[in-house]
């Protein structure tokens, strides 16, 4: 097998992709030139040696033997294209030089020098071709000096050898220049054609991919538009039905109270009247769901905290009822500390949490864990998921289970009203997820779903964050722990809202703040000014990022203090900036304590 592989590597050309254009043909040509030189040269070598011995041309014997050894070295040795090319051109040159010295211009010497120049043009291009022409011309001129001094033995057998040398030399140099330069120009044109064809091919491929991507995006947008229009139509219908039902139910819910006030405690009618009232209240709850689904039931006015709503739900009768009905299901709460507030309706968000937890429990008939968690999250750039999430500050609510999961064909329909895989009348009304959808949209939020059949589902709800407070609980003493003393701070961030938020917080803490909208602007500012601390956003597009900004500023302020911020996790670029000397890393969104303590810590170093 090893012998076969060795023979294959010798006698077959190298496997070079045709996509490499002219390089493909150059590799092939070089291989076949060396192989032909080795094969034909060896066949010519034996008679050449015989006649050279007979005629006592020992110089020819030396040249031919050395040439054949070198040819087989090039054939059997694995060398790069450049090294093998230089080796082959060396053979051509020294064969021509040797034959000129040994037998004069009437032999094959000029042909080998001509081959040296032509193959340089073909294999290496126009630049090396010009060098080879210069080498050939210099070689002929130098040898002309020896011809003038009559130092070559072959001159004795040729009449008027010097004149013959000059005539052949002039013709050789002219023909050499014309042929070599013509070939070089031709090869250069072919190479440009290959490059142009390659460029056109890449552009065509990119255009095809762009069109396919555009068509897919258009198809997805059309699907989303269709679903949105369908939901809007159903919501309009549901809103109208809910309005009429409310008028009907007002009597069913209100009159039983009046009747019960007139009935004695031991009246046999009290039971039926209470049942009527209870049914009316259940119907009213369904109407409320219809209004939410129709996006007519939520008025977003209050400042609230998701952690408090979760605490309220986990301690509610609804949650206790769920635990009794699903004893093998365990609910785990993982709230985020320093969670930002949101604007909204606590009643509707409570119901959203309840619906998601109920669905998760239904998806685990044999028990399992339901994990509820909250988190502050800053989105630097739009994220495509079930919803296309815009950039900004968010508070996320994540509800995950390890249940049966959702089939891919059902994911697109789960928010449709009355679409359910549960048993109607037993497990639900089919409005739960539609209510979740309506609530999130009324809160200007987004939903992302990740689900794998038989492995579980993760619902992530994105609520726009607010820095409004539910009530003022911060004390002057608490803020004094991380308040500033009029130190100067340069905030560098490409998002105007983020600059404003950070600036307002730091000014409130007693710092002198300057703003820069890009890394380039910050570097330019620092060339003329100084600051006690830099706050650098890591991702700034377009332009240089936070790490590069810090690196350039360090060139004229080697001891400059800085902290790095980002909406993403701590990346390699953040770590690189910290190796350069940056201090704390702050993950957005900002809070007073987070940014205050980070700045204080860095300034006190």
Image (tube, rainbow, N blue to C red):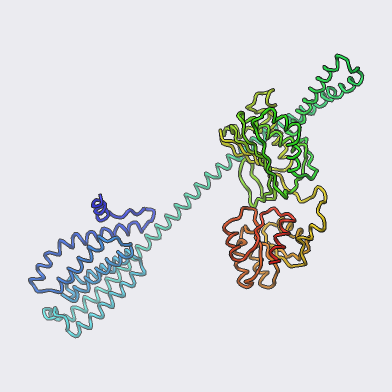
Residue furthest to the top in view is 268
Examine the image and state in which quarter residue 250 appears.
Answer: top right
Q: Is residue 492 above or below residue 103?
A: above
Q: Position of residue 543 (x, y in %)?
A: 61, 61
Residue furthest to the bottom in view is 149
Query: In the image, 172: left or right of 398?
Result: left
Q: Position of residue 92 (x, y in %)?
A: 24, 68
Query: In the image, 134: left or right of 487?
Result: left
Examine the image and state in which quarter residue 580 appears.
Answer: bottom right
Q: Position of residue 228 (x, y in %)?
A: 66, 36
Camera sees residue 446 = no
Examine the image and state in which quarter residue 286 appears.
Answer: top right
Residue furthest to the right in view is 262
Q: Total of numbered circles in the picture?
A: 0
**Which is more toward the observer, 520 or 574?**
574
Q: Position of residue 359 (x, y in %)?
A: 66, 32
Residue under the image location 57 percent in, 32 percent down: 407
Q: Is residue 401 above or below residue 128?
A: above
Residue under the image location 69 percent in, 71 percent down: 530
**Which is more toward the observer, 153 or 499?**
499
**Which is more toward the observer, 120 or 332?**
332
Q: Is residue 325 above or below residue 584?
A: above
Camera sees residue 63 = yes
Q: Quadrant of the C terminus?
A: bottom right
**Which is more toward the observer, 604 or 232?**
604
């Amino acid at each position: 097998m090893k012998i076969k592989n060795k023979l294959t590597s010798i006698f077959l050309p190298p496997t070079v992709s045709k996509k490499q254009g002219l390089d493909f043909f150059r590799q092939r040509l070089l291989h076949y030139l060396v192989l032909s030189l080795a094969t034909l040269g060896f066949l010519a070598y034996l008679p050449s040696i015989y006649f050279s011995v007979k005629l006592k041309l020992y110089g020819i014997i030396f040249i031919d033997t050395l040439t054949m050894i070198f040819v087989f070295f090039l054939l059997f040795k694995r060398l790069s294209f450049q090294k093998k090319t230089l080796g082959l051109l060396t053979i051509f040159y020294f064969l021509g030089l040797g034959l000129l010295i040994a037998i004069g211009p009437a032999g094959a010497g000029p042909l080998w020098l001509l081959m040296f120049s032509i193959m340089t043009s073909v294999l290496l291009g126009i630049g090396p071709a010009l060098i080879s022409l210069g080498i050939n011309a210099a070689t002929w001129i130098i040898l002309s000096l020896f011809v003038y001094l009559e130092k070559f033995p072959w001159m004795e057998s040729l009449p008027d050898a010097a004149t013959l040398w000059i005539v052949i030399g002039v013709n050789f140099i002219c023909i050499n220049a014309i042929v070599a330069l013509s070939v070089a120009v031709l090869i250069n044109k072919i190479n440009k054609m290959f490059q142009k064809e390659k460029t056109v091919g890449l552009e065509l491929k990119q255009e095809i991919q762009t069109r396919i991507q555009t068509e897919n995006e258009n198809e997805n947008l059309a699907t989303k538009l269709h679903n949105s229009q369908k939901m809007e139509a159903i919501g309009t219908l549901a809103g109208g039905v809910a309005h009429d039902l409310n008028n009907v139910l007002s009597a069913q819910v209100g009159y039983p109270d009046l009747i019960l006030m007139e009935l004695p405690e031991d009246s046999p009618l009290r039971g039926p009247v209470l049942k009527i009232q209870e049914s009316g209240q259940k119907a009213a709850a369904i109407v409320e769901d219809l209004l939410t689904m129709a996006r007519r039931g939520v008025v977003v006015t209050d400042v609230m905290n998701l952690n408090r709503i979760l605490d309220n739900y986990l301690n509610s009768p609804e949650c206790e009822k769920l635990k009794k009905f699903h004893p093998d299901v365990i609910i785990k709460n993982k709230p985020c500390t320093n969670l930002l507030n949101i604007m909204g309706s606590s009643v509707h968000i409570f119901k959203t949490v309840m619906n998601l937890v109920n669905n998760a429990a239904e998806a685990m008939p044999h028990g399992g864990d339901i994990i509820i968690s909250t988190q502050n999250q800053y989105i630097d750039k739009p994220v495509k998921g079930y919803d296309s999430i815009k950039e900004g500050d968010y508070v996320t609510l994540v509800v995950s289970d390890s249940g049966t999961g959702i089939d891919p064909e059902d994911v697109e329909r789960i928010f449709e009203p009355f679409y359910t895989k549960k048993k109607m009348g037993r497990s639900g009304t089919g409005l739960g997820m539609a209510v979740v959808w309506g609530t999130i949209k009324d809160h200007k939020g987004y939903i992302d779903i990740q689900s794998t059949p038989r492995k579980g589902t993760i619902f992530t709800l994105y609520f726009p964050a607010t820095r409004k407070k539910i009530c003022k609980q911060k004390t002057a003493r608490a803020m004094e722990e991380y308040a500033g003393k009029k130190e100067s701070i340069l905030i560098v961030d490409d998002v105007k809202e983020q600059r404003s938020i950070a600036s307002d917080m730091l000014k409130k803490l007693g710092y002198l703040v300057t703003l820069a909208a890009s890394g380039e602007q910050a570097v330019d500012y620092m060339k003329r000014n100084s600051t006690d601390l830099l706050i650098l956003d890591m991702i700034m597009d377009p332009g240089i990022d936070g790490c590069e900004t810090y690196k350039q500023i360090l060139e004229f302020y080697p001891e400059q203090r800085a902290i790095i911020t980002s909406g993403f996790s701590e990346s390699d670029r953040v770590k690189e900036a910290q190796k350069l000397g940056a201090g704390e890393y702050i993950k957005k969104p900002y809070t007073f304590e987070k940014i205050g303590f980070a700045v204080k810590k860095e300034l006190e170093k």
